[in-house]
Image: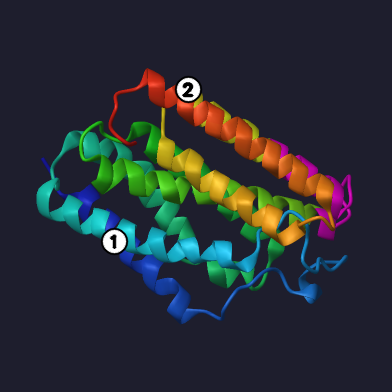
Amino acid sequence: MTKIYAILTLVFTTSFVVSPALTSPFSGFRADQLPNPQIDPPIQPEGYAFAIWGLIYGWLVVSAVFGMAKRAEDAAWDWARKPLIISLGVGTPWLAVANNSAIWATILIFVMAVTAIAALLRAPDGDLWMFKIPVGVYAGWLTAASFVSLGTTAAGYGVGADALGWAYIGIISALIVTSGVMLRRPAIAYGLTVVWALVGIIVANGTETWTVSALAAGGIVALLALIATTRARSRPSLS
């Protein structure tokens, strides 16, 4: 057997984690990147929610190092590593792209999300804390972030709806995707990460845009119910 997938996972995890230090900071699309500037779009979580990237980066590094040291030639890990490598490879230049093109950033983050979800669905049953859970957190945040990017970009280009309409569309779409993933394979960490993003949306909108907050709150209730249901059907260990 070969260690190539373990090596590539470690290499691209490293490049992904290091990339923010090599690009300009990104805190949302600039006004000059969109025909209709989006200042604090209602679909975007409060700033503190993005601190989850610290957890994601750290845990992915731990997973990649553990995988290289202990599961370098594990076929089950390799099956899940393949889409994860694509996600991390696309994610490495993402910040640089996002600082230049909202459209391409949106396309690429969906590629990242789809391949991260594929890795989660393929995750081995063992080593939950070393693979399935960190990848679940990563995929969960990308699921939410991809629809934040889509809603912001689409509203910025005046496609179909305004910022408020795209907030509704984005939240509902994220809930549909999250539910579909969790019904296919229980992944508590994945669902809770999307809940984290929804809480951030509520904090950002408060009572000022109460309809968005109410929709996000309803989504939280629905996801927590789904998490409880899927957990009851799965084995008792956290996943």
x and y percent of residue 221 in the render?
62, 34
Q: Residues within 10 Å of mark 2 (few under 14, many from 20)?
A: few
Q: Nearer the viewer, residue 201 or 7?
A: 201
Q: Residues within 10 Å of mark 1 (few under 14, many from 20)?
A: many
The residue singled out by tag 1 in the image is 61
Name the residue type under label 1.
Answer: Val
x and y percent of residue 179 in the render?
56, 29
Residues in magenta, as a range: 155-172
Instruction: Quadrant for the C terminus, please.
Output: top left
Instruction: Quadrant for the N terminus, please.
Output: top left
Q: Is residue 181 visible?
A: yes
The residue singled out by tag 2 in the image is 229
Name the residue type under label 2.
Answer: Thr
Height in image: 119 above or below 103? above
Q: Does residue 116 appear to the left or right of 235 in the view shown?
A: right
State which quadrant residue 56 falls in.
bottom left
